[in-house]
Every structure is written in structure tokens, then in C-alpha cells.
Amino acid sequence: VDKRDAKLAMAHIYVAMTALLLGGLAGLLQVMVRSGQFELPWGISYYQVLTVHGILLGLILTTFFIFGFQISAVSRTAGTLSDKQRRSGWVGFGVMTLGTAMAATMVLLNEASVLYTFYAPLMAHWVFYLGLAFVVVGSWIGGFAQIARYIQWKRENGKQPGPLLSFMVVVNNLMWVICSLGVAIAVLFQFLPWSLGLVDRIDVLMSRTLFWYFGHPLVYFWLLPAYMIWYTIIPKIIGGKIFSDALARLSFLLFLLFSIPVGFHHQLTEPGIDAFWKFLQVVLTFMVVIPSLMTAFAMFATFESVGRAKGATGLFDFFKKLPWGDVRFLVPFIGMVAFIPAGAGGLINASNQMNQVIHNTIWVTGHFHLTVATTVVLTFFGAMYWLVPHLTGRVLTPQLNRLGIIQGIVWTVGMSIMSGAMHAVGLLGAPRRSNFSTYGGSEQAVEWIPYQIAQAVGGTILFIGIALVLYIFIQLAFFAPKGQQEYPIGEVEENAQTTPMFLENWKMWVTICVALILLAYTVPFIDMFQNGPPGSIGYKLW
Ligand code: HAS
């Protein structure tokens, strides 16, 4: 990667790592409070800490790391950014960072303890909402710079499919722009006028619907960069080839189509939305599972081809031939394995009847700690171990490789205990997002306490994992020996079919995407406009 692009990518990764440190600390405090054995000092509120944790880890760590990785990916595969594109990248970075600082300041001042979903009628200071708007707008500016590099490549190289990794970056940015329109509308037309006192009331159902129109594709915006690494980087690390370029592209396009019109599966228990539209979106939710199943298939196929090429026989011997001592493979692999129970949990959540059992319980928190905080985050850590030294002109030493493996194991142990306890106690009815542990000694809550203590134990182990990863990051960024670390990009199998050009027909894919969104949302929105409940005044959690 060109040095100037590397600097831009690293700037994003520095912010991401700062978010990991502060967000991780907030997570540690939180599990302590939930255990019932610890009280926060100096009048700090539980919801304030929970908001810091959710925003810094769920929104800031992810978005900034993803942008850092995507910039490097485009620069590496489509070519060095032009000066204009790089300038847009820096402007986007500046606007996003300013927005983050504005929102974070308000949360730290206890003026925005509204949790990472900032649901109405919880009301934050208007500076918080403006900060969020800046983060979104900054991400559009930065995202367009990445898309522009791809367009330039296409212009220069005529009618052939663009580089796979850059193609994937374009899909993720397109999905992000289309979905973040929802949250931008909610912030500009609902939250800002309401928090500035220009209007008294807010339509809660509308704002939650706009949020989830954005919120579900948001989770795929986190997942797709992990899939980019699985599809294009892992094959090279394990000494193999990409199983199928066409399959990888199709699975990304299916995410573009089906990630967005599914937000109602977060609102299944909500009154005011007709059951038919919930049913339709649940069906579409099951469609979005298909590209993940395709990915699982492609990963098994890649592992098997590599293993057999190295002489494996028998049904599963090929697993033995994989490079288990290489942190760049092992840590993302743990993420893949975690996605099997995590994905199964998602299917449970999406099933209407079972959703009635788990909704708003801490089961959901367990689900997203397995998906985003294990599958996605471990894949990002695994990538960071080669990406950061590549960008800073250093190398991953055998000692840091070993420490990275220990980090992955610590994370797996901590997360298994914490997320396992969350899933189990969720089924016993323990609510998520609650400051209370014993509920005044209620008989039912007494049952929850041992699980909540297990959560605290797991959370503490995870915090050790965060300390380790930050130590490795600092070593790789500033102290590891100078050298050239490979940016591993896989090539496609020789006997794979050629990639059909219709997979690059952006007009067609975006049109289908918009049509599906209109199908899933037009009538419900008209209904909300016409028959929605009277708006609500604002409330604060402190
Ligand atoms: Fe989810 C709630 C449904 C995936 C994140 N989800 C959340 C929330 C978050 C989140 C943050 O339908 C909470 C939001 C809040 O604060 O309220 N989720 C799904 C479904 C999927 C899914 C159907 N979620 C994710 C991913 C996330 C994420 C990915 C982050 C990255 N989720 C829901 C629903 C709710 C929800 C409801 C609302 C619940 C409620 O009521 O509040 C699917 O996309 C999952 C499909 C995945 C699979 C797994 C495929 C497996 C693969 C691994 C292959 C392994 C290999 C290794 C190759 C079918 C690809 C093999 C090696 C061996 C040795 C075996």
C-alpha cells in the first residue's frame, strides 16, 4: 500500500484502538455493576457507562477500523488513491472524528445517556445528535472516495470485472450509504428539532422504524469486512486460492439486496406495525441468511482444497493441514467457528414466536457479543496483526505471533463464559439494559445472580484480552522491527468459472435493492403517517 494511503488508513485505526480502550473499560465497569457486587462511584450512572460502551465499541471502533481496512484494500487492489480521493478520505476522517468527539463529550457530561440505539423518547443534548450526523456525513465522504477509486479502475481497464476485494468494498459502501439515509432522516427531521425545543413531541414508532431501517444493515456493515478477509485474505495465508470469485461476489450482492428491508425483525413485539409487514420482513430476514450459508460453504471448500493439496485423505483430515500456529489464520478461524452458534441464535431471534421469549432479555446481548464482538472483532484482530505492520513498515515477529494466539484464546475463554451466561440467563427472563441486579430481593432475580457473576468473570477475562491486543497493537505500530510485512491477497482457483459480467451491473442491483425497500416499507410508513400514535415528550434516564 502506498505510504500516503497507509497514513490515512492508520489514522482511522488509531481512533479505533482508542475507542477499544475506553469502550472496554466501560464494559468492565458494567459487568461489575450487573453482578450486584459493585457500585459506580462519583454519581456515574449505569446508563451513562452503557452508552459509552455501546457507542465506542459498537459504532466507533467498528466504523473506524472498517474504513482503515477498506482504504488499504482499495489502495492495494485497485491502485493508489488519487490526490483528490485521498483528500476526500482525510476530510471524511476529520468530519467523522469531530462528530465522535462531539457525541462522546455529551455522553461523558451525562447529557446523552440514551444508549447506542438512542431510541426516543429518551432525549439527548442536541450536540450529541449533531455529532452523530457528522459521523454519518463523514463516512459518506470517505466512502465515496473509496468508490471513486474503483470507478477509476474500471475506466482504465475496460470491460472486465474489477478486483474482487475492491468490488466488495464498493458493495459495503453502497449498502452503508443507502441504509444510513434512514438514520440521517431521523436525526435531521426528528431528533434535532425535538432536542432543540423547536417541536414538543416526537413520533416514537417512526423514529424506531427509521433506526432499524439503518440498524440491521449496520450489523452487515460490520460483518462484510470480516467476510472480505475470509474470502480474499485467508486463502492466501493458508497457502490456497479463492474458491470462487463469482460466488463471493454473488454473496455480497445478496447482502446488498436483503440486508435493508428486514428492520422489523427488531420490532416484532412493537404495536403499530401490521402483522403482514412483520411477516414479510421475517421472510426477507431468512433470505439474508443465504449468503452466510454460501460463505460457510466457500470456507469449507477452501479449507478442504488446501488440505487435500497438502496430502490430506479421509473425511476431515484436511483440518490437520491448516496453519494452526499462524495468528493471522487462527484468530479469524475462531471467529468463524463462533459464527455457527451466533448465526443459529440469529435464526432463533428472527422466528416470531421465539422472539417473544428472548426479546429485551440479555439473550440478545449474548447474541451480539458472539456475532460482532467475537466473529467480527476476532477477524479484525487477526487482520490487524499483518495490516498494522504492513502499513507502518514493520514486521510481525514470532513473539508477537505467539502473544496474538494467547490473546485469541483469552478472548475465546472470556467470551464463552460471558456470552454463554447471557444466553442462559436470558432464557430465565433476565432483562437487558437494566441497572438492577437483585430487584429488591425478588425470588426470580435471585436465580439470575450466579449467571450475572459469571458474566462479570467472563467480562474481566475479556478486559485482559483487550489489554493484550492493545499491547500488541502498540508494539506493531511503533516498536516491532522494521521490515516488509506481506499484504496477503488470494488468487482465484485456476479451474474456477469466469466471473459473469452481470455481477457488475450496478444499475440493476441498486434498482432491485430500492424496489425491495419500497415493497417492505412504503405501506407501513404511510400507515404510520396516517394512523400513528400521538408523539411523545422527551425523557431522561438520570
Ligand atoms: Fe443479529 C439482534 C437476527 C446476524 C448483531 N443482532 C442483534 C443485535 C445486534 C446484532 C447488535 O431477528 C442487537 C440490536 C439491539 O441492540 O437491539 N442476526 C439475526 C440473523 C442473523 C444475525 C437472522 N446479528 C447478526 C450479525 C451481527 C448481529 C452478523 C453483527 C455482526 N439479530 C437478529 C434479530 C435480532 C438481532 C431478530 C433482534 C432480537 C430482538 O428481539 O431484539 C443472520 O445473519 C445470521 C446468519 C448466520 C449464519 C451462520 C453461518 C456460519 C458461518 C461460519 C462458517 C464456519 C466455518 C468454520 C467455515 C447462518 C458463515 C468451520 C469450522 C469448524 C471446525 C466447524
Image (cartoon, rainbow, N blue to C red):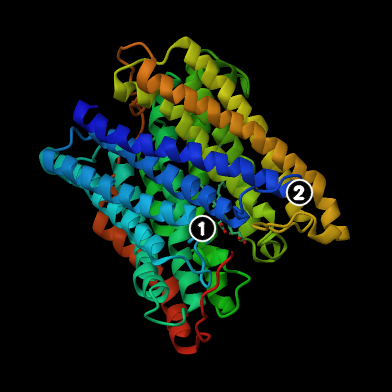
- Type of amino acid at the residue the image marks with label 1: Asn
Residue count near mark 2 (Cα–Cα under 10 Å), binned few <14, some 14–19, many ≥20: some
Q: Residue at x 60, y 78 (%)?
A: 271
Spot occupied by residue 357 in the image (x, y as percentages of width and height): 72, 62
- Numbered circle sitting on residue 441: none
Check the picture and name the quadrant holding the N terminus.
Answer: top left
Q: Nearer the viewer, residue 213 or 536?
A: 536
Question: Does residue 439 appear to the left or right of 20 in the view shown?
Answer: right
- Type of amino acid at the residue the image marks with label 2: Gly
The vertical placement of 428 against 16, above or below, is below
Spot occupied by residue 101 in the image (x, y as percentages of width and height): 37, 50
Give the foreground label among 1 and 2: 1
Spot occupied by residue 152 in the image (x, y as percentages of width and height): 14, 43
Sequence-earlier tag: 1 or 2: 2
Spot occupied by residue 229 in the image (x, y as percentages of width and height): 41, 33
Q: Nearer the viewer, residue 420 or 441?
A: 441
* Disc 1: which residue: 110
* Disc 2: which residue: 36
Question: Does residue 280 appear to the left or right of 490 in the view shown?
Answer: right
Q: What SS does tag 2 mark? A: loop
Q: CA distance from mark 1 to mark 2?
A: 23 Å
The vertical placement of 157 against 394, above or below, is below
Question: Does residue 159 show up?
Answer: no
Q: Mark 1 vs ligand 1: CB under 8 Å? A: no
Q: What SS does tag 1 mark? A: loop
Question: Does residue 216 appear to the left or right of 102 in the view shown?
Answer: right
Question: Does residue 299 appear to the left or right of 99 in the view shown?
Answer: right
